[in-house]
Amino acid sequence: MSRHRIAVLPGDGIGPEVVAGGLRVLAAVARRFGLEIELVEYPMGAAGVAAAGEPFPPATRDAVQRADAVLLGAVGDPSLDQAPRHLRPETGLLALRALLGVYANLRPVAIHPALLDHSPLKPERLRGTNLLIVRELTGGLYYGEPRGNDGAVAINTLRYTRAEIERVSRLAFKAAQGRRRRLLSVDKANVLETSQLWRQVVTGLATEYPDVTLEHLYVDYAAMRLVSDPSTIDVLLTENMFGDILSDEAAVLTGSLGMLPSASLGDGPGLFEPIHGSAPTIAGQDVANPIGTIASVAMLLRHGLSLPEPADAVEEAIATVLAAGARTRDLGAGPGEALGTRAMAERIAAAIR
Ligand code: NAD
Ligand code: IPM
Ligand code: MN
């Protein structure tokens, strides 16, 4: 039996709590399927600054490169919001994504039937929603040079190469082939040159995937479609910044930002993290929803370690406890009935079959 090495980066705020929940379920599924998993834990974000003076310390850097997969909680701390860029937790996260070369960020959005009433959207609009956001993750405004702020002028650069667009688009076309065979590419080609290139490249690739129906939308209207008619979307492909914004919007459909997992994939080890942040105002209170992280563990098993059956078992366990009425506070549970972070993870671990 092969041994799987996972680098665990709990990070900041609620990160350590939700990661503990994810590891609790990972232990249960490893026992059930006889998996041999080695966990190595390293500081990241504000925890990295505290431990080693930088948000992505050298020891963490080494560990993620030697791992089969990386599990991250979240980074970010208000005490560093005004820090110089090289000390910001978010800068460490961007460096981690760049180092691993994880150019494609998969953010699946599925509505659990038991949570249909928890979204501000009407259940009849939500029914049937099951979409996958494919967000380009290592290019665009987040990485473009020049950048800077001298107090009088601030600059960011939006830059995309044909090759960057092509590799993430291919992944999205292939993902669509395994689903409902519809690809929605989102851009701002009515204004931006980068989006014009994006649209050209995606359109050019479509001939290689004739079984996939391709549609293009401008990002402003796509943002509206996501809430007015989400069930018509299968795979939504977009650039880094648009994907960041649209995925938090999509989380509303599921009932809570705490529900959404992600997988960031490239040619080396994958990075798996919930899409939410460090939620500093609720950190340390055992109230955060661990499901986004637990579902990220499922994605880690499926995409990071090529273990589809254990991945299914984790997703089924999440569905089972939600159907049975288990709710954290963000899912609308009242004071007496809300499960804490630990209790929710424990329930899901106990439901692994
Ligand atoms: P956030 O996602 O941390 O929180 C937004 C809201 O959602 C808050 O009300 C929070 O309490 C709630 N929330 C988030 N996750 C939750 C969970 N699992 N359970 C219950 N409620 C949850 O976003 P923010 O407040 O804009 O940012 C806070 C910090 O996190 C910032 O420093 C930001 O840069 C960082 N951040 C990090 C990541 C990441 O590590 N990938 C992602 C987003 C934001
Ligand atoms: C996310 C986060 C990050 C991003 C931040 C913290 C850099 O919002 O993972 O969605 O914008 O990618
Ligand atoms: Mn985000």
Image (cartoon, grey):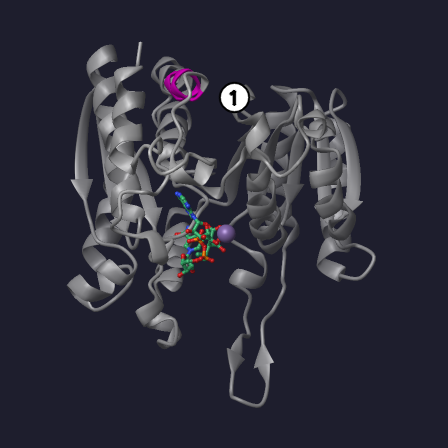
User: Which residue is more in the foreground, 115 or 53?
Assistant: 115
Outermost top residue: 353
Q: Position of residue 128 (x, y in %)?
A: 66, 21
The span shown in magenta is 317-322
Residue 148 falls left or right of residue 227: left
Residue 202 falls in image quadrant: top right
Query: In which quadrant is the N terminus drawn?
Result: top left
Residue at the image point whose x is 63% and y is 55% from the top: 161
Whether residue 85 is situated above or below residue 150 in the rendered picture: above
Q: Which residue position is annotated with label 1?
A: 114
Which amino acid lies under the numbered mark 1 shown in the image of this protein? Ala
Please give the name of the residue rendered at 35% of the width and 36% of the height, measured from the top-left corner: 290
Residue 268 in view? no
Give how far across and how far down residue 353 sits, in percent: 31, 9
Residue 175 lies, with reference to residue 275, above or below; the image says above
| Magenta span main SS | helix
Q: Residues within 10 Å of mark 1 (few under 14, many from 20)?
A: some
